[in-house]
Image (cartoon, rainbow, N blue to C red):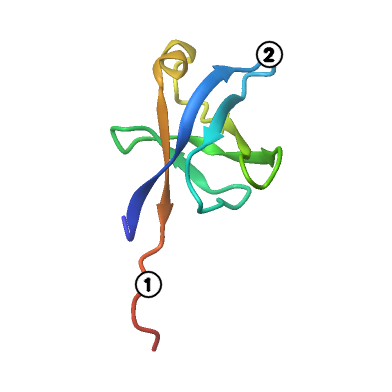
Amino acid sequence: MRGSLTLLGSVLHLSKNNKLVAKSLSKAFPKIGDPVYDDKSRIIGSVYDVIGPISSPYILIKPSSEIDPDDLRRIKKVYVLLASKGRRR
């Protein structure tokens, strides 16, 4: 894994259409499709959408099919991988 995991936000709930809704706690905005990790560095899904005002956005996360729905309800914090800025060649 290149880069470091950065706190994306705290999970508020699981929506009716099975998306995790997280309140962003970070100034870094993820891109649609970026992988999302739990506190054990497991990929739990990907960024599905970013909604709300720029000052306090919400992140919708599409869960991975490998994650058990009961495990989704236990996730409190989510993280994204920010690429480390290295030397360009």
Horizontal side of residue 41 vs 24, given as left or right: left
Which residue is nearer to you in this view: 25 or 2?
25
- Check disc 1 and report its element: helix, strand or loop: loop
Q: Relative to 15, does residue 5 appear above or below in the rendering?
A: below
Q: Image quarter for residue 88?
A: bottom left
Q: Earlier in the sequence, mark 2 or mark 1?
A: 2
Q: Could you tell me which residue is drawn at 63 percent across and 40 percent down?
A: 57
Q: Could you tell me which residue is drawn at 35 percent across and 66 percent down?
A: 84
For marks 2 and 1, give the CA distance.
38 Å
Residue 63 rendering spot, x and y as whole percentages: 54, 28
Count of residue discs: 2
Residue assigned mark 1: 85
Q: Which amino acid type corresponds to the residue marked 2 in the rendered image?
A: Lys
Q: Could you tell me which residue is drawn at 71 percent across and 37 percent down?
A: 52
Q: Which residue lies furthest to the bottom in this view?
A: 89
Q: Could you tell me which residue is drawn at 49 percent across and 14 percent down?
A: 69
